[in-house]
């Protein structure tokens, strides 16, 4: 039995210790993932017949036998009994008993094989039929008629053969050459009318357990080789495979009532006539129409209807340009006049900011689903041009909505992601997003992906755009089934969409619907496609629109008649015309009407902050002490932590007793206090639970019990908000996008993403450039996400050093040459900026800036350059006194030593930010220049503290002003700070530079060079003659 068990184990994800009995008694429930348990210790059978494809057959027989030993041929029964009893490899097989008894069960089925004395031939033929069925299941999609144009660009080694389901063996032999390597497995003409027992892995029999070969082939053709191509046999879960087989193989399963057909036609009318209407009215406007894939609208509506029927009441969608207006109009049901008025170039913008083009804007709409009569909220997330960038954002928002409504299994909230074929295959973010799909803190419990596969990307053919046969192959990495469907067969599309929605609600896993269609026009309506795809477009010109085809079909079936059809068209055209007339009254464009994530109650009715003040971010002593004590303890019983960690916690405890905090404790205090106030906190990123620098330790691990963990932060207060801290996958683009999406859902959460080292954020640049920096300006949508970016020149080499502050600062929207006319810089300046950039030099300031993020009456992204060596620097500590009620975040920290006592004596003011401050004070002390040189720390770089720095500069009238940084001159803060500092002093003095020379790389890889450079910049900073010759 060992051999068979091994064989079965290789095919099923079971632990090695699970017994055969367990397997038979408890077929595993729906598995969400393939457990990576290796079971390869024993050699596979030495049974003479157990090899290659026959092992599949044996596996089938084996499972059938486990369930009911009588369901298999007697010879198998004996074999499995012997094997189970421990027969040695090669000895379990015994000649079978006479056929007459073994086939008694199948007596009604005219078993021609009964007459056949040759049992070997019987087994062989059944093996052949089994293999044949499997071949259809695995490769049937290769020959399905998926391409409405019939010019399939899918490039398989073996060209598809067009065969009608009239079973003619000669033709089928050719067809099977495509499906199988070994041709027809030895079956011949004479076998066509023989009846074969069907294995348990097929449903083509319906109620019958045996069928003639001819009928088997015909039914497989119907299931796998028509307008639907099902790719699923790679899925590592038998139950899921069975589920899919049942959905596509069961005879007659794809039936539609006349009512359903009429609904489908009506939806096609809307989809088609909407594009035609836009084309008639604005023929020279870009709209990225849906022509060639009009079926997308009924497809999406089907997914939504079915999901609503299964209990979903909130669907969050992300999609690219193609068909977006149509989706807004006909799926989300945005008022048509709101869409039409966007085509009016005279419309005035009502909102601040840049706004965005009409096919990027988002939407949020709550309505009744007419099919299920249930409430449904639909939201389409606004997105940039950057294809697929919105994918993780949608997922993050979905996760957040699930989290806030306690939907732990994704039963109420779901996401649908739409993709273009070229982008789905080409953009790496698709892969990153798929890999979040089953991670505990990132799963949205299944996403339905719909690919508008028009077989072209702008002007590029699939052959040049991807190295895989389908654009959807990326989905295979997460075992998502892929349903390819010919978009010119609307019923096949709707069927597949129903199955996809059911799949999601059954298994809570991703699924892909690949709508194989075409693009009737060029990339946009202005583009000439014949330049580059002449033959394809000759074919497209001949293509009857899908609406016309389907209407003709339904008319021929008597489901509708011509006048009814025309009436449906006229009805919708009238709706469009009336909306168009109304749209002319719109004079102002309100982007607010296109908001995808409203925050009810957070703003006033007209969208303004409820106040323009921020309370003190300080905290009372008791709370500080309490949080500190929990942070330095293990708040559960019988939990053994690592000895090294005990020491860390002990040190924390001592700090608390001494009323001081380091960085990790300051973060704890900020998080812990916000949790008390009901603010959910989510910290995500690579290795954040411990902290890259082993300073955080927010998740404690029991040293004796596997996977037993404790998060003390969740043991702080009786009714506290939950704290989520999660190590992410090794992705920046995907994870940052996800967290941004999470932060979109609610203003009452502090969502933080930490880069492992600050420079790694550049692989997420698109999320920063397209969403975080301009999000509010483009989409009037605020977002309070926090980026923690470890930064600092510490001799670690060109990477791991710079979080590239220059890039963030360059994208700040404050004017370097204008001193802002504001009464209140503290809050108003923050309200006006696009994001906040800080580099704190003390733990207390870090604590305050985190708390301020939530206590502000609006939300702005916050970029924090965080320290590495300062995490343990004995001087980088703060006292509780700096965190008590009444204290607040310090935008600058002025000098408080001898220089500040006699400011008129001061010869130089060094302005700096972050860690270099500690190098500068040490050097100043060593040189005994504390009365000559003042050091001012700029903690908030942007928005720039013009007001405070002006005062600071005025305080030292005789001093030279120097900006000092450890970064290279063309990097860091200098280019940002210099013009602004000059503005604060009315350009009365120069602002000198002390720092590293310009360079291409952020830092040297040589430790000695690093130290030499550091010493040189310190020399410049304290050499009072350094700029004499330059003045
Ligand atoms: C990341 C990114 N790169 C390039 C582009 C420019 N671009 C816009 S549409 C397009 C083709 C997209 O093809 P596909 O995904 O098949 O969608 P289709 O337009 O065919 O619906 C390209 C390359 C883009 N928008 N985003
Ligand atoms: Mg395309």
Image (cartoon, helix red, strand yellow):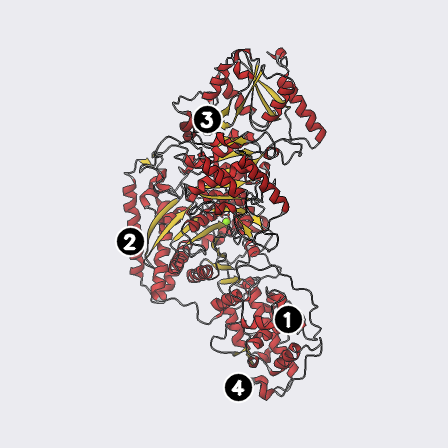
In the picture of the structure, the residue carrying the numbered disc 2 is 571
* Mark found first going from the N terminus, 4 or 3: 4
* Label 1 to label 4: alpha-carbon separation: 31 Å
Q: How would you rate the neighbour count of disc 2 (Cα within 10 Å): few for under 14, some for 14-19, many for 20 or more?
A: few
Q: Quadrant for the N terminus, please.
A: bottom right
Q: Is mark 1 within 8 Å of ligand 1?
A: no
Q: Is residue 581 left or right of residue 74?
A: left
Give the side of residue 350 with respect to residue 753, left or right: left
User: What is the CA distance from the residue labelled 1 to the residue labelled 2?
Assistant: 64 Å
Comparing marks 3 and 2, which lies closer to the viewer?
Answer: 3
**Tag 3 residue:** 814
Between residue 925 and residue 417, name the one nearer to us: 925
Residue, disc 4:
107
Q: Quadrant of residue 586?
A: top left
Which corner quadrant of the image does residue 783 belong to? top left
> Quick check: is the Cβ at mark 3 less than 8 Å away from ligand 1?
no
Disc 1 is placed on an element classified as helix
Q: Is residue 553 visible?
A: yes
Residues at marks 1 and 2 touching, judged by CB atoms closer than 8 Å:
no
**Mark before the other along the chain sequence, 3 or 2:** 2
Q: Does 473 sit above or below residue 670?
A: below
């Amino acid at each position: 039995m060992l051999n068979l068990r091994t064989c079965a184990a290789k095919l099923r994800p079971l632990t090695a210790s699970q017994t055969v009995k367990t397997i038979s008694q408890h077929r595993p429930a729906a598995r969400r993932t393939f457990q990576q348990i290796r079971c390869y210790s024993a050699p596979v059978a030495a049974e003479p017949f157990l090899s290659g494809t026959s092992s599949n057959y044996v596996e089938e027989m084996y499972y059938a036998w486990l369930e009911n030993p009588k369901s298999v041929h007697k010879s198998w029964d004996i074999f499995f009994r012997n094997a189970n009893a421990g027969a040695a490899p090669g000895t379990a097989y015994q000649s079978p008993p006479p056929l007459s008894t073994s086939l008694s069960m199948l007596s009604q089925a005219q078993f021609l094989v009964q007459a056949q004395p040759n049992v070997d031939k019987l087994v062989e033929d059944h093996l052949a039929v089994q293999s044949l069925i499997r071949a259809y299941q695995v490769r049937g999609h290769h020959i399905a008629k998926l391409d409405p144009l019939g010019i399939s660009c899918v490039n398989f080694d073996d060209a598809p053969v067009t065969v009608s389901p009239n079973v003619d063996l000669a033709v089928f032999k050719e067809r099977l050459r495509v499906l199988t390597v070994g041709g027809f497995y030895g079956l011949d003409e004479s076998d066509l009318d023989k009846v074969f027992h069907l294995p348990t892995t097929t449903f083509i029999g319906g109620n019958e357990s045996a069928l003639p070969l001819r009928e088997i082939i015909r039914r497989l053709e119907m299931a796998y080789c028509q307008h639907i191509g099902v790719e699923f046999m790679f899925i590592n879960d038998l139950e899921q495979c069975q589920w899919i087989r049942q959905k596509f193989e069961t005879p007659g399963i794809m039936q539609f009532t006349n009512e359903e057909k009429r609904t489908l036609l009506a939806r096609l009318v809307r989809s088609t006539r909407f594009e035609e209407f836009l084309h008639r009215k604005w023929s020279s406007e870009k709209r990225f129409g849906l022509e060639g894939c009009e079926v997308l609208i009924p497809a999406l509506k089907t997914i939504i209807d079915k999901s609503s029927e299964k209990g979903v009441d909130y669907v969050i969608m992300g999609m690219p340009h193609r068909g977006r207006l149509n989706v807004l109009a006909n799926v989300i049901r945005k008022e048509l006049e709101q869409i039409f008025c966007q085509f009016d170039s005279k419309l005035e913008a009502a909102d601040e900011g840049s706004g965005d083009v009409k096919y990027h804007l988002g939407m949020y709409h709550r309505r009744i689903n007419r099919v299920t009569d249930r409430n449904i909220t639909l939201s389409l997330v606004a997105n940039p041009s950057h294809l697929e960038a919105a994918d993780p954002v949608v997922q993050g928002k979905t996760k957040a909505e699930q989290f806030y409504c306690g939907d732990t299994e994704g039963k109420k909230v779901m996401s649908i992601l739409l993709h273009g074929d070229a982008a789905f295959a080409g953009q790496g973010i698709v892969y990153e997003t798929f890999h979040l799909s089953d991670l505990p803190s990132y799963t949205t419990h299944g996403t339905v992906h719909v690919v508008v596969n028009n077989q072209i990307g702008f002007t590029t053919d699939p052959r040049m755009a991807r190295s895989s046969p389908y654009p959807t192959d990326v989905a295979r990495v997460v075992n998502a089934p892929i349903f390819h469907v010919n978009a010119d067969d609307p019923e096949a599309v709707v069927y597949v969409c129903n199955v996809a929605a059911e799949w999601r609600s059954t298994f809570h896993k991703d699924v892909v619907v690949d709508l194989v269609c075409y693009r009737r026009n060029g990339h946009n309506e202005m583009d000439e496609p014949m330049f580059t795809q002449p033959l394809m477009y000759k074919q497209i010109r001949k293509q009857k629109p899908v609406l016309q085809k389907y209407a003709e079909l339904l008319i021929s079936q008597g489901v509708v008649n011509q006048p009814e059809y025309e009436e449906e068209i006229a009805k919708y055209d009238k709706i469009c015309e009336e909306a168009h007339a109304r749209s002319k009254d719109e004079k102002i464009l309100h982007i607010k009407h296109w908001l995808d994530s409203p925050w009810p109650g957070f703003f006033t009715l007209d969208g303004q902050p409820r106040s323009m003040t921020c309370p003190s971010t300080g905290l009372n002593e008791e709370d500080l002490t309490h949080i500190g004590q929990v942070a330095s303890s293990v708040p559960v019983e019988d939990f053994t932590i690592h000895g090294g960690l005990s020491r860390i916690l002990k040190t924390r405890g001592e700090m608390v007793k001494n009323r001081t905090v380091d960085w990790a404790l300051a973060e704890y205090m900020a998080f812990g206090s916000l949790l008390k106030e009901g603010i959910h906190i989510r910290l995500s990123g690579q290795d954040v639970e411990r902290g890259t620098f082993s300073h955080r330790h927010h998740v404690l691990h029991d040293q004796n019990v596997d996977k037993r963990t404790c998060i003390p932060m969740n043991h702080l207060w009786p009714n506290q908000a939950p704290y989520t801290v999660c190590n992410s996958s090794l992705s920046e683009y995907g994870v940052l996008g996800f967290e941004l999406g999470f932060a979109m859902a609610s203003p009452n959460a502090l969502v933080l993403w930490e880069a492992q080292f600050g420079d790694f954020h550049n692989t997420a640049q698109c999320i920063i450039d397209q969403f975080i920096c301009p999000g509010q300006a483009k989409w009037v949508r605020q977002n309070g996400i926090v980026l923690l970016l470890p930064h600092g020149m510490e001799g670690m080499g060109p990477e791991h050093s710079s979080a590239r502050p220059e890039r963030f600062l360059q994208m700040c929207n404050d004017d370097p040459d204008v001193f802002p006319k504001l009464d209140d810089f503290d809050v108003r300046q923050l309200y006006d900026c696009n994001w906040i950039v800080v580099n704190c030099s003390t733990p207390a300031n870090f604590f305050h800036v985190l708390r301020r993020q939530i206590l502000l009456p609006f939300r702005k992204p916050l970029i924090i350059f965080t320290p590495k060596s300062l995490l343990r620097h004995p001087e980088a500590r703060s006292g509780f006194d700096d965190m008590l009620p009444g204290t607040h975040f310090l935008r600058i920290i002025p000098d408080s030593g001898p220089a500040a006592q006699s400011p008129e004596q001061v010869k130089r003011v060094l302005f700096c930010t972050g860690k270099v401050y500690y190098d500068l004070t040490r050097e100043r002390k060593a040189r005994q220049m504390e009365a000559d040189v003042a050091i001012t720390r700029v903690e908030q770089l942007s928005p720039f503290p013009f007001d405070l720095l002006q005062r600071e500069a005025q305080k030292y009238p005789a001093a030279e002003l120097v900006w000092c940084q450890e970064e290279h001159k063309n990097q860091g803060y200098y280019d940002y700070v210099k013009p602004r500092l000059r503005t604060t002093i009315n350009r009365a003095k120069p602002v000198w530079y002390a720092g590293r020379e310009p360079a291409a790389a952020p830092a040297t890889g040589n430790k000695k060079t690093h130290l030499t450079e550091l010493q040189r910049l310190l020399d410049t900073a304290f050499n009072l003659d350094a700029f004499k010759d330059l003045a």
